[in-house]
Image (spheres, helix red, strand yellow):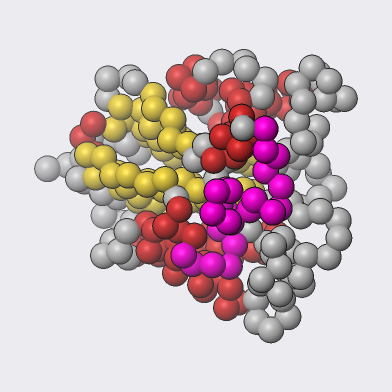
Amino acid sequence: MRIELATAPGDHQVPNEDYASVALPASGQGGALVLLDGVTPPEEDYGCAHGVPWFTARLGGALLELSGSRWDIPLTGCLSEAIERTAGAHGTTCDLSHVRTPQATVVAVRWDAERVEHLVLSDSALLIERTDGTVTPVLDDRIDRLRAAGRRPLAALRNVEGGFFTAAADPAVSGRAVTGTLPRAGIRAVAALSDGAARWVEVFREGDWTECFALLRKEGPQELIDRVRAAEDADPERAAFPRGKTHDDAAVVFAEFQAPCR
């Protein structure tokens, strides 16, 4: 099995708030990957003594462990338990009811010899390549729909009905994720991208999702991130390509499956 992963901070003076990891059991027949994109809070106090990198590491590590070990529960259940564990790890020092309490987007995928299960929450992306070469993006498009309706995705729309959802301190948010299960035999490879890496498609329009997947297959995740950085550097004032930050944290996981053993 081919696994490649790359991540880079948007600003080397600031900790990377993305998390990406993969777990492969000794059997060689299955595995799990998790990618989180931490939500950067504004400068004012947001009720937490730990910070977003701490949160994404805690939540990502818990979700990866549960995804790889608890096949008796769906990924939504794994995410719920991971959120509950992470909330408990805050202790009594943090206000988890704060609208800006540390939170993250989530992509999780796990597979065995029979199936590939996936979960996407908020604006990170999952790409699924089928054995016929078709590439399908799995996206949680709530933020895009809010923007299309002329509503800016502000804090007041976060984790509320009619708004958009991120993984923070409420385990029930897992029920808002985009989920699915596909036969393993029909899937060739998958790729998870934080929105900082997905800028290549969504902001800079360098290619579509199929071309993005082809780039990942041929050149690898680091090349995609390098190309995003080059596009960002070419537009430092964000005039040609409006975006919230000149540079954003970026993470990519690419996983190509072998044919399952029978």
Residue 19: x, y in percent?
A: 60, 51
Residue 157 in sight here: yes
Residue 61: x, y in percent?
A: 52, 62
From this viewpoint, which residue is outermost toward the left?
A: 262
The residue sitting at 35% across, 49% down in the picture is: 110
Q: Is residue 128 above or below residue 96?
A: above
Q: Can you tell which quarter of the image residue 174 is in? A: bottom left
Residue 255: x, y in percent?
A: 41, 37
The residue sitting at 59% across, 23% down in the picture is: 201
Main SS category, magenta section:
loop
The residue sitting at 62% across, 32% down in the picture is: 149
Magenta stretch containing residue 27, yes or no? no
From this viewpoint, which residue is outermost toward the bottom?
A: 92
Residue 170 relative to residue 181: left or right: right
Residue 205 relative to residue 213: left or right: right
Quarter of the image where the N terminus is located: top left
Along the viewing direction, whichever of 172 and 157 lies nearer the viewer: 157
Start-end of magenta stretch: 150-172
Q: Is residue 182 above or below residue 68?
A: above
Along the viewing direction, whichever of 68 and 50 lies nearer the viewer: 50
Quarter of the image where the C terminus is located: top left
